[in-house]
Amino acid sequence: MTLFQARNARLALFAAAAMLGLSACGGAGTGNAPSPAGGKQQANAGANAMQDRSYKSDAEKLFVEKCAMCHRDFGMGTVVLARRVEKGQEWLEKRTDLQADFVKTAARAGIGNMPRITRSDVSDAQLDAIAAYLEKAGRK
Amino acid sequence: MGSAIGAQYVFTTEEDRIAYSDHYSADETSHQPLGAVAPATVEEVQAIIRIANEHKVPLWTISRGKNFGYGGSAPVVKGSIVLDLSRMKKIEVDAENGTVLVEPGVSFFDLFDFIQEHKLPLWLSVPGNSWGSVAGNALDRGVGYTTYGDHAARICGLEVVLPDGDLVRTGMGAMSGSPNWQLYKPGYGPSWDTMFCQSNFGVVTKLGLWLMPEPESVLGFDIDVDKPEDLGWLIDTLAPLRRQGIIQQSPSIGNWLRAAATLTLRDEWVEPGKPLTESVITAIRKKFNIGWWGVAVRWYGPLEINEATSRVVEKAFAGKPVMAMRPTRWVKGDAPEGSPATGVPVTYPLANANWFGGRGGHVSYSPVLPVNGALALDQYRRTSALYAEYGMDYHPSFAIGERHMTNVNQLLFNRDDPDMMKRVDSFMRALVKDATAKRYAEYRTHIDYMDLIADTFDFNNHALRRLNERVKDALDPNGILSPGKSGIWPANRREKRS
Ligand SMILES: Cc1cc2nc3c(=O)[nH]c(=O)nc-3n(C[C@H](O)[C@H](O)[C@H](O)COP(=O)(O)OP(=O)(O)OC[C@H]3O[C@@H](n4cnc5c(N)ncnc54)[C@H](O)[C@@H]3O)c2cc1C
C-alpha cells in the first residue's frame, strides 16, 4: 500500500464510519450470531484522523485559521485535489507550482468545488499574506 | 453605511455580489444580493439597522453563511444587503460550568482551536460541514453527532439586536450582571430563545451554548445492514433504546451513497446519465465494504456505565440479521479519536459535491417522521421511486431522535449538467408534495422553498403564518430584516410571497 492509498483508506474509514454514520473496512460481520458484535473490540474507526492545526509563523497561522479546514489533512480541498493533481501535490503547502496571483484568483473567483471566499471572511491584506506564504511553502 | 462601520467593510463590487450568492445553485443570480456589510461590534450592527430602517432596505443576516444545501449566504430576496457577522469572533468559555458565549463569526474550527489551545476539558458537537458558525448553525436548528447534537436545544441565553435597533438579552441575561445567563434557560416569564431560531425577528449578536464535559470514555457500535428492507427492523431496534435514553445521541442511518459520494466518483462506475443499477451498487459497496445502510451509535461517560450500555445494546441486536456490528472504543488517555463522534470539526463531507466529477452541489429535502420502521420503509420506497423517476441518485439518511426521525435527503447534482439542473426544481416540488400528502413537513429548507414549506403548515387556514406575521409586523414595521426567511414576510412585501 502506498502512502497515498493508506491515506485514502484512512479517509474512507473516517468518512464512512465516523462522520457519516457508516462503518467500513472492518469485515467483522457476524451474520446471525447470537452475539451480533462478536465480542471483538476494535479501536474506533477514524482514530487519529484529526487535522494538524499547528503553525510556525504569522502567515502560516493565517493559513491555518482561514484555509486549513479544507486544505490540510482530511479537508475537502485536499480530498478533491487528490483526484486531479500529481501525488503529494494535493496539499497546497507542498505545492511547488503555486503563484501568489493564482492563489488570490482561485480564492476570490472560486475554483471547481471551492466556493468564493468573501472579503469579510479573508481580507485583501490577509489573502496577500496567505498567497505569499503558499508560493514559498512548497519550495522550501 | 461606510461611515457607520468603515468603507472597507462595505462590499459592493460585482465580485462581492457573486461571492455572497448561493454557489450550489443552477442560477446564482436568482438570489444575488446587492452587496454585504460586515460589522465588528454590536454598536455597528445597531448603526446598520438604523440606516436600513431609514432607507427601508432589506438586510439578510448570516453568521458565517456556509449554509450549503440551504442557500449558503444568499438572501431569499434578490437585492438584499447581506449582514455578514463573520468578523465578530469573541469567545468566552466558562470551563467550570461547561458553557460558551460565542459571537456569530466564531466557526467550529475557531472554537475547537480555542479549546485545544487552552486545554479545556470540553467537547464540541459539530455538523458534517464544520466550516460554518457555531451560532449560525444552532440558530438554523443544525445538528451534530454527539449527545449535544440537537444544537438549538443547547442554546442558553442570547443577545439580540431587534429590528428597531433595541438590544435585548434573553433568559437570565435580562438581569444585568447575572452569573446565570448561560446556566438557566427559561429566565422569568415567557422565554424567547427559540423565537430567534429559523426566524427573522432579530439579529443575534451573542449566543450562549452548553458544551459537553469531556467524558471518561466513548463506546459504541458501527452497524451495517445488507439490504434496503433492513431499514425497518434497524429503526425499530434502535428506537426504544433512544426513547429510554440508553442511547442519547441521534444515530444517523445513511445509505451506501452517503459514504460512497465522498469516496469515489460516479463516472468510475457507470456511464454519465445511466442509472446506478443494483449490480453497480453492489460493486461499490464491495470495494469500500459498506452496508446498504450503516449507522454509528455511541455512548459517552464513565467506562463502567458505557460497558454496561454496550451489553444492553448488543442484547437488543441479538438474533438480528446485521451484516456487521463492530464495537468501537475510546478511553481517556487514548490518542484523540479524531472524528465528529468526539466533536472534531471536519469539512471532508463537502467532497460529495464532486460525486459527478465536476462542479456539484445539493439541496436538502428533510421531512420529519415518527420513529417507526414501517413508516421509514414506506418513506424509503416512495422517495427512492421519485429519485429514479427524476433520474437522480438516492442519498438519504434517517436520524433517530427521542420521539421523531429527521429524514435528510441530499439532492446531489452536477452544476455542469444543465439538463439535470432543470429537473431539480420539479423534483424537489414532487418530493414535498409526496411528504405533504403523508402530513410530514420539513425541519429546515433551502431559500428557494421557504414559502413552499411554510404553505404546508396549513392548520386553521395557516394560523401559524398569521401569528408569525403579526409578530413580524410588531417588531419590524419597515420589513428590513431577512424578509421571506421561513416564509415569514413583512407587511410591505407580502405580495412577494411565491
Ligand atoms: C456536505 C454537507 C454536510 C452538511 N452536514 C450538516 C450537518 O451534519 N448538520 C447540519 O446542521 N448542517 C449540515 N450542513 C448544512 C450547513 O452547511 C451547516 O448547517 C452550516 O453550519 C450552516 O452554515 P453557518 O453555520 O455558516 O450558518 P449561517 O449560514 O451563518 O446561518 C444559517 C441561517 O441562520 C440564520 N442566522 C444565522 N446567523 C444569525 C444571527 N446571528 N441572527 C439571526 N439569524 C441568524 C440565517 O437565516 C442564516 O441563513 C451540511 C452541508 C453540506 C454541504
Image (cartoon, helix red, strand yellow):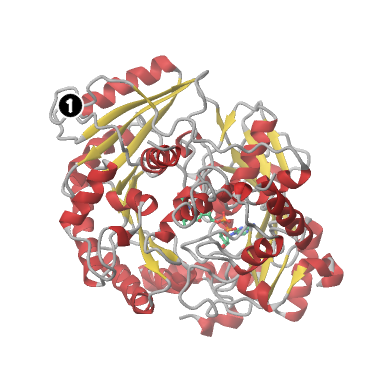
Residue sitting nearer the eye, B207 or B188: B207
Residue sitting nearer the eye, B48 or B334: B334
Look at the image and tell me in which quarter the C terminus of chain B lies.
Answer: bottom left
Q: Is residue B406 visible?
A: no
Chain letter belonging to callout 1: B
Report which quarter residue B297 is drawn in. top left
Q: With respect to residue B260, does B344 lie above or below?
A: above
Percent of width and height locating residue B113: 65, 38
Query: How many C-alpha atoms fall within 10 Å of the one at disc 1: few (<14), some, or many (≥20)?
Result: some
Q: With respect to residue B461, does A5 lie above or below?
A: above
Q: Residue furthest bottom?
A: B495
Q: With respect to residue B189, does B269 lie above or below?
A: below
Q: What residue lies at 56% left-to-right and 63% top-to-bottom? A: A115
Look at the image and tell me in which quarter the N terminus of chain B lies.
Answer: bottom right
Q: Is residue B443 left or right of residue B285?
A: right
- Mark 1 = which residue? B318
Q: What residue lies at 49% left-to-right and 70% top-to-bottom? A: B447
Percent of width and height locating residue B409: 34, 58
Percent of width and height locating residue B346: 51, 45
What secondary structure is marked by label 1? loop
Q: Is residue B298 visible?
A: yes
Q: With respect to residue B415, does B372 lie above or below?
A: above
Residue sitting nearer the eye, A40 or B143: A40
Q: What residue lies at 12% left-to-right and 29% top-to-bottom? A: A32
Q: Amino acid at mark 1?
A: Ala
Percent of width and height locating residue B75: 58, 71
Q: Residue furthest top?
A: B304
Q: What residue lies at 34% left-to-right and 37% top-to-bottom? A: B296
